[in-house]
Image (cartoon, helix red, strand yellow):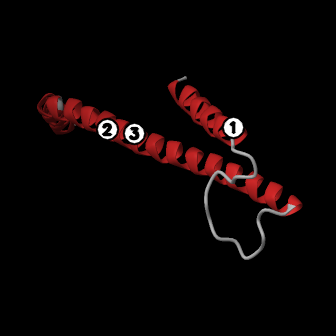
């Protein structure tokens, strides 16, 4: 839910930023090898910049989520390892008792 709200708010911000542009002003200033202020080129360049910023925001959110998920995964694995180490001695004693029992059974045959 938190991820969805973060993505939604970033998309709304970028779209609002794109809608509230000045007259014949691109959102990002950049050099293009054509006259970007002529009619079809301006609209295409404008749409390209808005889409590119939206995709960049999505990639940024995805990277943040990936790092957080990896940290959470490592934390869970370390907790499992800690629990396994706590019961290691108990398992070794139980395994030793099973080994002694099996030796006694084998000697009786």
Asked whether residue 101 is in view, the answer is no
Q: Nearer the viewer, mark 3 or mark 1?
A: 1
The foreground one among 96 and 31 is 31
Residue sitting nearer the eye, 26 or 53: 26
Name the residue that disc number 1 marks.
20
Q: Nearer the viewer, residue 89 or 38?
A: 38
Residue 31 appears in view = yes
Callout 1: 10 Å neighbours few (<14), some, many (20+)?
few
| Left or right of 9 in this view: 72 | left
Which x, y percent locates residue 78? 26, 38
**Which quadrant of the figure contains the N terminus?**
top right
Residue 102 found in image quarter = top left
Of the image marks 2 and 3, the number of the one nearer the N terminus: 3
Disc 3: which residue: 68
Question: Which residue lies under the disc numbered 2?
Answer: 77
Work out whether mark 3 precedes mark 1 in sequence or the reverse, and give the earlier one: 1
Query: Which type of secondary structure does the marked residue at label 1 adopt?
Result: loop
Q: Is residue 13 left or right of residue 25?
A: left
């Amino acid at each position: 839910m938190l991820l969805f709200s973060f993505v939604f708010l970033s998309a709304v911000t970028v779209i609002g930023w794109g809608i509230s542009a000045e007259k014949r002003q691109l959102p990002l200033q950049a050099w293009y090898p054509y006259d970007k202020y002529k009619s079809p080129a301006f609209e295409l360049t404008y749409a390209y910049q808005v889409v590119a910023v939206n995709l960049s925001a999505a990639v940024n959110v995805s990277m943040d989520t990936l790092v957080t998920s990896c940290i959470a995964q490592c934390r869970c694995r370390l907790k499992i390892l800690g629990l396994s180490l706590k019961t290691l001695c108990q398992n070794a004693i139980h395994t030793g008792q099973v080994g002694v029992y099996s030796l006694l059974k084998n000697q009786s045959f």
